[in-house]
Image: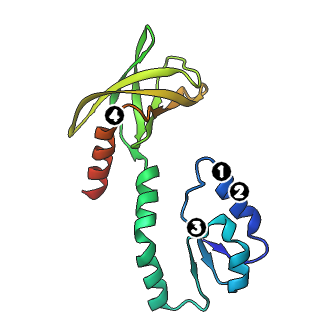
Amino acid sequence: MVRIGSQVEGVLESARSSRSNHRMVIYGLGGTLKDTMKLSKYGINAVFQEPLERPSALKLVKATQMLVLHEFRRYVRIPVITEVSVAAGQKHFSASSIELSSGGMSLKSTEEVSQGMPLEVSFALLTLPRIWVRGTVSWCKPATRTFGIRFDPRDERKLRIKEWVESYLES
């Protein structure tokens, strides 16, 4: 939530130009219609009027609930530790998962990887039988021996992971 006014433009510019946050839900607070219209290019999703009144605030939250839920499901990270088999070309090694999302996962391993490295991972969860999915190393921190992978958007097997994440959130 940002307070509508002259100081907020830099924050909105930063949020909307960020690769990972450009689609985030942004609520405005207060300000005049003129002030809000000046910021329209940043796509403020909804504005709470001041003074805040419970019925109108609840109505606004209810109207934007699905936006927030969709954003949460897109970026939710589920902490889960399981053994992961990694195949990077001819190199095969084991890793432990740290977090899982529908778009990727973070891992810990003694093996070195580099950003941009294509690989395929295999793992199983309590209600998800072993699955293989292609991905790419999106970040790595050699000091902590951790790295993240983004699942290949063309690999349809990742849909099973997305379904698992959604069922986990609903339970």
Dot 1 alpha-carbon crowd within 10 angstroms: few under 14, some 14 to 19, many 20 or more? few
Dot 2 alpha-carbon crowd within 10 angstroms: few under 14, some 14 to 19, many 20 or more? few
Disc on the earlier residue, 3 or 4: 3
The three-letter amino acid code for the residue at tag 3 is Ile
Q: Is residue 58 above or below residue 152?
A: below
Residue 44 visible in the displayed image:
yes
The three-letter amino acid code for the residue at tag 2 is Ser
CA distance separating discs 4 and 1: 27 Å
Disc on the earlier residue, 2 or 3: 2
Disc 1, disc 2: CB below 8 Å? Answer: yes
Disc on the earlier residue, 4 or 1: 1
The three-letter amino acid code for the residue at tag 1 is Ser
Dot 3 alpha-carbon crowd within 10 angstroms: few under 14, some 14 to 19, many 20 or more? some
CA distance separating discs 1 and 3: 14 Å
CA distance separating discs 1 and 2: 6 Å
The three-letter amino acid code for the residue at tag 4 is Glu
CA distance separating discs 4 and 2: 33 Å
Mark 4 against mark 1, which lies toward the viewer? 4
- The front one of 77 and 41 is 41
Disc on the earlier residue, 4 or 2: 2
Which residue in the structure is indicated by mark 4? 156
Question: In the rendered picture of this protein, how many numbered marks are placed on residues?
Answer: 4
Which residue in the structure is indicated by mark 3? 26
Disc 4, disc 1: CB below 8 Å? Answer: no
Tag 3 secondary structure: loop
Question: Residue 14 has which mark?
Answer: 2
Mark 4 against mark 2, which lies toward the viewer? 4
Which residue in the structure is indicated by mark 1? 18
